[in-house]
Amino acid sequence: MKKIRIYILALVAGLLIIPTSCSKDFLETRPTDQLAAGDVFNSLTGAWGAINGVHRSMYIQYNSVQAHGGMDGMLRYIDFMGTDVLFNTTSNGWYLGTYRWTDHRNERSNQVLYWTNLYRMISNANQIINNIDKIAGSESEKKHIKGQALAYRAWSHFMLVQLFADRFVPGAANSQKGVPYMETITFEGQERISVAEVYNKINTDIASAITNLEGYTRANKSHINKSVAQAIQAQIALVQGNWNLAATAANAARQGFSFMTTAQHQDGYSLISNPEFMWASFVQEDQTQYFYSFYAYMSHNFNSTAIRQSPKSILKDLYDKISPTDVRRTFWYPTAVASAQPSVPPSGLRFNYMSSKFKAVSVSDSRGDFPWIRVAEMYLIEAEALARQTGKVEQAKDVLFLLAKNRDPQYVRSANSGQALIEEILIQRRVELWGEGRNFTDLKRLGLPLVRPEAASGGQGGHVASFAIKLTEPAGTNNWTWMIPRGEIDTNPNLEQNPA
């Protein structure tokens, strides 16, 4: 297989000087074919190498932390803090503090280091944005490189402000503390700007990315083209309650993409060739992720301690809402203990309602291509945004029907309206995106409380109080906001910690 040469920029500037331990770890994990920033931006070839390095950084191991297997590690944190992914045991301990809602409130935990990881990505994107126009060469190529870097800068700040700041409230002033928005390379500590200001800058960046990516034909799905930038714009607009933009951007983003077949649903959501994958990382055979892969935690077939001892299950209450004729219902096994399905690693434990949605290459190979955005999400965003607008309920039903009918041949166009229709769409969203890192942030954006139904006495399919500890959390408390890493606070006198 042809190898792609990539360059990850040496500078790790951004919000502040990274603490020594993190800096050392980062230097140790950079590829040997790295160029200094000055060399990279001597040519378009070097600039393409730089943006390829950013693509690659979506699935590198950060901070030498096993749970930080690329940006999908952050998405695991998001789902494990939600309602719909169940921990069946506590035997291996991985992500247990996340599941119990303690690690994100601990400023010294590994979980909150995604603050640093995201700012590293922003720093590398800024190197590209701030240097690309100085290079001699094709203006269209420079725009296509810059557009992707702008999309990464917007997406990274979007994730940061969702996690490390209080919720964006549609229609409110949103003057609460947000995050520093980094647009230049500096080692001077920056202060937090308001949530409203952060989103204004995010919106500017993603709109500029869309403009720059006009006419770009990407080499593979790991790159960001105009459709992907529009998909990110739709996600951002949904959180802000900008329903018209969310629906319009989602509709534009999904054009040209098709649904997967019933057979492709059974492939394990791990192949970049899947027609629904809009933006995804392709993991080459010589770039295995070992035990920090997404599939080392969430597949049903890789032989890892996390899977053998604590396979993940879906909440029974959600499973029961899936139609018997819906192909997605086949992802979970309500009688796994008594049946031969799904296949599990040697000596693996079985629990009812356990998942087979995700599949690693094999029992000894944890690789799998990971979808950052699938086209199904665009249908769901468009449907929800339309359903929340006056006079557009019928359009919302039409969009929902396209997705739901594909998943369930027996699905009948919804007769719901108002809040009942919105609830139907949100249930479809929970089912469709289970395990893909949307649950906690969805609860937060909607201002909903955490409610984790317990398992029936002696049964499975619900949260076990002694495992989860955290079964409820009212909406809007401080606990919905992640703490900023202590190393960042100590290094930057301008940075204010979130309330305890």
Image: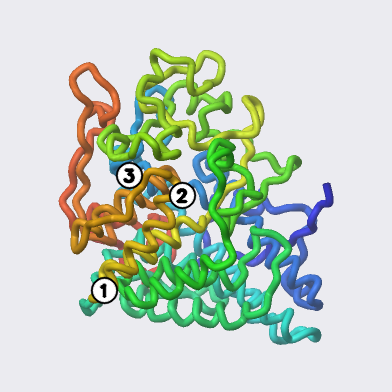
Q: Which SS class for mark 1?
A: loop
Secondary structure at badge 2 equals helix
Residue 139 vertical placement versus 176 (above, below): below
SS class of the residue under badge 3?
Answer: loop
Q: Which residue is mark 3?
A: 81
Disc 2 designates what residue?
406
Closest to the camera, between mark 2 and mark 1, is 2
Query: Is 206 situated left or right of 142 in this image?
Result: left
Dot 2 and dot 1 residues touching (CB under 8 Å): no
* Residue 23 visible in rendering: no
Q: Position of residue 199 (x, y in %)?
A: 38, 76
Mark 1, residue position: 389
What x and y, as percent, mark residue 455?
22, 26
Q: Residue at x 27, y 64 (%)?
A: 166
Disc 3 or 1, which lies upstream in sequence?
A: 3
Q: Quadrant of the C terminus?
A: bottom left
Residues 136 and 19: in front is: 136
- Relative placement, left or right, of 3 versus 238 is right
Amino acid found under the numbered disc labelled 1: Gln
Identify which amino acid the numbered label 3 is placed on.
Met
Q: Which of the two marks, 3 or 1, is nearer to us in this view?
A: 1
